[in-house]
Amino acid sequence: MLDEGDTTRISEPPSHYLRENWWFTTQPIEEPDDPEHLALAFDALGMVDRIMFSSDYPHWDFDAPSQTLPRSISKEDKEKIFAGNACRLYDLPRR
Amino acid sequence: MTVATQVVDVDVHVAPQTVEPLLAHMEPYWADYVANAELRLSPTMNGLYPPVAFLAGEEEGTVQPVPSTLDELRAGLGDDRTAVLNCLTPFDSSHNVYYEAALCSGVNDWLRTEFLERDPRLRGSLLVPTLDPDAAVAEIERLGSHPGFVQVLLPIRTEAPWGNKRFHRLHDAAVKHGLVLGLHAWGRVGNAPTTSGFTTSYLEDYTTNSQIVAQAHVTSLVSEGCFERAPELRVAMLECGFTWLPFLLWRFDKDWKGVWREVPWVKERPSAYVLRSMRLSTAPAALPADPAVLARIPDLMPVADLLMYASDHPHRHGGTVEPLLEVLGDDARQAILSGNASTLYGL
């Protein structure tokens, strides 16, 4: 059984910690038949601020930036994923 | 949920309270073995889950034990639905392969005589030893043609994924007798509930065991070409959830496109095999809280083709499939409540 000290370690639903404390990289990006489904997944996760582009170069399954995110992802979200989120996390200069 | 008529419930649990009623169906040697070793049947499969957590009733004092008799089953289930009975008792019985095989046979004969031959609405899953594929095949040969058995029940916490070549003769035996392979959550407590080791908390175990480990069996069965070598093989994922499936298949199809040369026996996209040959039970249903996202689930996966209603009686995990059923049309709802199971199990 968890005692009081244990239970207070988790005061929010698990998804809260993932959305606040976790970052994910895109490669290898999922490619549903209908690109709208990827947009739906992003929306449902509510984590578009935590997703960062990665190419995984030079591995065979690397993702080229020009082909990674389908048109179903909004321009605003693409900007976050391609640059903004990583700049914030790693404190990188914005060009 | 309130269950209407024409429901097939594909995951109802029964279990003997003690080993005694099983011994009547086992060789006399095992009565001596059980007595000398003071072996007991564990109601929680040797601590796989805490018996009063999650599985507890919605209110204090309403915990229902797993039915051990037909009367208890009828009293607890509350109606006379067609049901597939799953007894998990042997999932973590022993590493003595001979005892495991004998216990499975004992459970199967107990299921047959106490339930299946007493109520024509009931069907059962055949328990087979997980450590000895030859003994598993022998048990399928012994009872697989009994009309009460429609499925071979396999745990997901195992030493090897079920698509592994060592199990192909088990697949063949199931196909020969028209039995589905039913992969059910849980298994051996000695096999990690995650793909990267053991957990500290039941929360981690519970969240990962059924939905993460289950995915390894899906990829195994497809990648090992099991549905090419045995096109009639049918697999039911029981108590493993289902909303994870579309995301696995996106990735599975993509990766196959990249490395298909490694598995030339996989001739179609992995999702094609899954959609054709696998079905999933509805309990527990991990559904999104946002109704707008919930309403899109049928876009992501053909739920009307894939899902089979299950109560998981007497367990209660919280979260029913009802919100999903409510956004579906009548035909889709009926397919999930009875049609898909009737087709899969030949009811």
Image: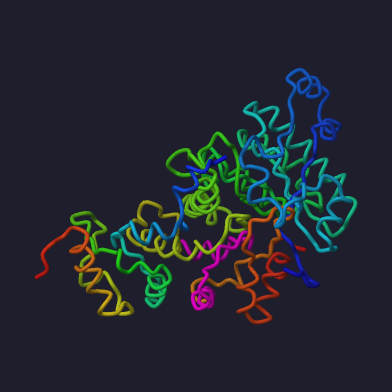
Pick whichever, B105 or B17, lies toward us.
Answer: B17
Image coordinates of residue B345 in percent, x first then y, are 72, 60
User: Which quarter of the rendering shows the C terminus of chain B?
Assistant: bottom right
Image coordinates of residue A10 in percent, x first then y, are 45, 51
Is residue B300 shown above or below B183?
below
Image coordinates of residue A53 in percent, x first then y, are 24, 64
B140 horizontally vs A41: left or right: right
User: Which quarter of the rendering shows the N terminus of chain B?
Assistant: bottom right
Tell me which residue sits at (59%, 63%) in the image.
Answer: B285
Q: How is the image coloured?
A: rainbow
Picture mark count: 0
Is residue B75 shown above or below B97?
below
Asked if residue B291 is among those painted magenta in the image, a careful observer would answer: yes
Pick whichever, B221 or A23, lies toward us.
Answer: A23
Tell me which residue sits at (23%, 65%) in the image.
Answer: A85
Pick whichever, B109 or B172, lies toward us.
Answer: B109
Residue B232 visible here: yes
B165 horizontally vs B187: left or right: left
Residue extending farthest front: A4
Q: Which residues are magenta?
A: B270-298
Residue B233 visible here: no
B25 horizontally vs A14: left or right: right
Tell me which residue sits at (64%, 34%) in the image.
Answer: B46
Image coordinates of residue B212 in percent, x first then y, are 49, 51
Asked if residue B50 is among those painted magenta in the image, a careful observer would answer: no
Is residue B54 shown above or below B342?
above
